């Protein structure tokens, strides 16, 4: 590989270059005029728009960039990556809107330059994560994402809550990335390469000390499980989600989870695939029983997330446990190990993006006014803030999977995939979990509408722009709940992982 | 006579375990960070060992990146510890416990 | 013949022997006249004032952190330096972009004032005008006494 081929491969990472250039631009703007902070969100939105255009242009390409051998490279530009890049970009746009009106972020207005810089660091990390097909690039991009998000979680640094969340995040994150790196180093030692495609072709013909390979793979799974906050590795999630500023919490729960899922799917599918039959079922190499591992992670996540959420009083913390449970549902789609299951997970992700961001946004707007995220403080608020109350109810019902919403569609597609793969028992457990989750979502609604309060409740004013953002988030849930062909087609068209 | 590869691997596994145990039992945030660095460096040792054993350079290049990442992580971790210390006046992880179940 | 480990062992043995011989030879030769005075701690010949366990200025940490980052990022230049001669002008540009980005970070820190050494605020002996008059009188009284 010579330098000319590297330069010519740069056209495959145009979106990443756009994001990196925006990052540098934000630093420069902040450097030149440190006083004016109003332009920063708009520069960020512009950069995201440019990157979005490049991502959309890239749909349909299936090429390796930065080749390390004739048939494989470090970076796979394919539809699967582009799909998750779009999820990340949409989440970023909404989170920038959230940040503009968040009172927590306004309190650190002096450091807004760093805020957007770090956010673009996160986006850059996630972009490389979803396309990485080499363990080196996977590790570095995960670290880029993690390091930026550690700082952002503790961004409101004069509050104990935020810095404590940040410290816990760093410690858990550091340990899990250390474990993952050790796993990578063992796999490198066993196969002599870090490229997923080459590892696949080597483990197809060669036999290894089976147990070492198993342990190394499990170590890598720990690192990825941490990123998607699946159950045995979820301990950081409630604390960080509760302590971090709300826009960052929303961002971590959607974008960083999406990127983690993309890496996990790519890692499993490329490294362990043996063949794909004409129904789209993946036949994996007989080294590791991935289905059992993922089903185990998934059931643990769902059950633990849902049952712990039952007795949470802080709405942010409740949504954190709910997002652990949602990660469990999405893992089910991977556990099917077929193209149908993968499509179901991707459809669920589109829906999850809107409903989870929406719920966090309404919670943030209410917290801006009443200064609390406690569910008890929500009593009777349904009358003083009709619009926010209705939309919050809508987002929560969608998270629970109630019919007219898109959340229902997401769950139905998942369950169909499970039943088609003869995983009835797992489907039943997931269904029971959904029933449990209904209880804690409805508890919020009960406090909003049914509880009689004597004292006067504050009237919450809603600016026109914020109302518009809420409608932008709620409309897709309503539309996709009824007319879901476009998202199904979109997901079906983007399951092409390079090489298969 | 060469030192067999197992010796390096055992050493790095021992370092890794030291790091894990350190994270689990020590309560001072800074020492926990040192343990995390120990874990990363044990992985570095494995990478270098295999790189030299297999005679390809991927491992060595990777180690450069890991070193840079480890430094960045240490810097961020220490900065966060300072921020927390200014608020709480302690770096003892047992006392950092606003959040419960 | 010695094995690789044997050589290392010989080194260790020599080092340990050196220390032991030096210590014991000193013990044999030197006069031993212990007094109580010799056991006390001292700072530069003076008696110590207070505990040595004092908090350092937080600024030391900030400078150390910045140094740590820049010190280690430069390690990336080592693999680049090995190959850039083969890759001509483009290779040079790649390294230059990396260094420019590092320099940008440096400039950012400088501009944000993280490299300034925050001097401790000197409590003014001369009274400022912003202080309320009653307090002022009191302090003047104190000063007078």
Image (cartoon, rainbow, N blue to C red):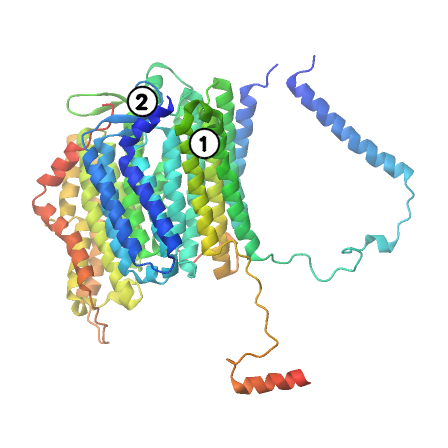
Which of the pair C44/A258 is nearer the observer? C44
Residue at figure coordinates x 18%, y 21% from the top left: A277
The first of marks 1 and 2 along the sequence is: 2
Circle 2: element type: loop
- Image quarter of residue A98: bottom left
Percent position (x, y) of residue B4?
A: 56, 18
- Whether A445 is drawn above or below A308: the answer is below
Q: Which residue is mark 2?
A: A72
Residue at figure coordinates x 7%, y 46% from the top left: A482
Circle 1: element type: helix
Percent position (x, y) of residue B27?
A: 53, 49
Residue A75 visible from this viewpoint: no
Q: Which residue is mark 1?
A: A182
Residue at figure coordinates x 54%, y 33% from the top left: B15
Quadrant for the C terminus of chain A, please.
top left
Which of the pair A42/A413 is nearer the observer? A42
């Amino acid at each position: 590989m010579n330098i000319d081929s590297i330069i010519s491969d740069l056209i495959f990472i145009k979106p990443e270059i756009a994001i990196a250039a925006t990052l540098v631009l934000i630093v420069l703007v902040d450097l030149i005029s440190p006083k004016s902070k109003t332009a920063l969100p708009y520069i960020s939105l512009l950069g995201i728009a440019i990157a979005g255009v490049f991502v959309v242009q890239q749909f349909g390409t299936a090429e390796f960039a930065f080749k390390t051998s004739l048939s494989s490279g470090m970076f796979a530009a394919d539809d699967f990556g582009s799909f998750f890049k779009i999820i990340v970009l949409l989440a970023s746009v909404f989170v920038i809107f959230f940040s503009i009106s968040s009172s927590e972020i306004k309190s650190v207005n002096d450091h807004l330059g760093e805020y957007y810089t770090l956010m673009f660091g996160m986006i850059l990390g996630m972009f490389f994560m979803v396309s990485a097909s080499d363990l080196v690039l996977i590790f570095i991009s995960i670290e880029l994402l993690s390091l930026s998000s550690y700082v952002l979680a503790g961004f409101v640094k004069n509050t104990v809550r935020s810095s404590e969340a940040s410290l816990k995040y760093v410690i858990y994150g550091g340990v899990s990335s250390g474990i993952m790196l050790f796993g990578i180093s063992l796999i490198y030692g066993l196969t002599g390469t870090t490229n997923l495609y080459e590892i696949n072709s080597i483990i197809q013909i060669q036999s290894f000390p089976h147990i070492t390979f198993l342990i190394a793979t499990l170590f890598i799974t720990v690192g990825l499980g941490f990123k998607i906050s699946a159950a045995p590795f979820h301990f950081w999630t409630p604390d960080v989600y509760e302590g971090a500023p709300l826009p960052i919490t929303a961002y971590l729960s959607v974008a960083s989870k999406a990127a983690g899922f993309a890496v996990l799917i790519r890692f499993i599918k490329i490294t362990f695939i043996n063949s794909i039959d004409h129904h789209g079922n993946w036949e994996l190499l007989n080294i590791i029983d991935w289905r059992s591992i993922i089903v185990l992670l998934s059931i643990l996540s769902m059950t633990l997330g849902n049952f712990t959420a039952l007795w949470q009083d802080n709405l942010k913390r409740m949504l954190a446990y709910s997002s652990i449970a949602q990660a469990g549902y999405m893992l089910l789609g991977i556990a099917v190990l077929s193209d149908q299951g993968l499509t179901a997970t991707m459809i669920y992700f589109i829906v999850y993006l809107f409903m989870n961001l929406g719920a966090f946004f309404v919670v943030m707007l209410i917290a801006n006014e009443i200064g609390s995220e406690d569910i008890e403080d929500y009593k009777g608020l349904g009358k003083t803030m009709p619009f926010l109350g209705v939309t919050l109810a809508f987002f929560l019902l969608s998270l629970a999977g109630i019919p007219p919403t898109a959340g229902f569609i997401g769950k139905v597609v998942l369950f169909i995939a499970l039943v088609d793969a003869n995983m009835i028992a797992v489907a039943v457990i997931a269904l029971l979990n959904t029933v449990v989750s209904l209880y804690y979502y409805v508890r919020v609604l009960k406090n909003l509408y049914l509880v009689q309060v004597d004292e006067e409740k504050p009237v919450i004013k809603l600016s026109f722009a914020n109302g518009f953002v809420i409608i932008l988030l709620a409309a897709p849930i309503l539309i996709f709940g009824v007319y879901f062909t476009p998202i199904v087609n979109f997901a079906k068209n983007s399951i092409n992982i390079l090489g298969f | 006579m060469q030192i067999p590869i197992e010796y390096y691997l055992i050493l790095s596994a021992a370092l890794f375990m030291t790091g894990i145990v350190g994270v689990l039992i020590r309560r001072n945030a800074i020492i926990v960070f040192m343990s995390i660095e120990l874990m990363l460096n044990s992985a570095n040792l494995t990478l270098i060992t295999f790189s030299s054993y297999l005679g390809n350079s991927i491992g060595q290049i990777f180690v450069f990146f890991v070193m840079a990442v480890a430094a960045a992580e240490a810097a961020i971790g220490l900065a966060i510890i300072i921020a927390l210390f200014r608020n709480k006046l302690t770096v003892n992880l047992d006392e950092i416990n606003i959040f419960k179940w | 013949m010695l094995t690789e480990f044997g050589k290392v062992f010989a080194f260790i043995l020599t080092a340990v022997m050196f220390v032991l011989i030096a210590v014991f030879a000193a013990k044999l030769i030197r006069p031993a006249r212990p007094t109580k005075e010799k056991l006390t701690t001292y700072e530069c010949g003076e008696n110590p004032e207070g505990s040595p366990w004092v908090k350092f200025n937080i600024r030391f940490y900030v400078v150390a952190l910045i140094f740590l980052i820049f010190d280690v990022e430069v390690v990336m230049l080592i693999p680049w330096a090995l190959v850039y001669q083969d890759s001509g002008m483009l290779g040079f540009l790649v390294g230059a972009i990396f260094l420019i980005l590092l320099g940008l970070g440096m400039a950012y820190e400088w501009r944000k004032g993280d490299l300034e050494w925050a001097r401790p605020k000197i409590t003014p002996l001369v009274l400022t005008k912003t202080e309320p008059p009653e307090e002022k009188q009191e302090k003047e009284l104190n000063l007078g006494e």
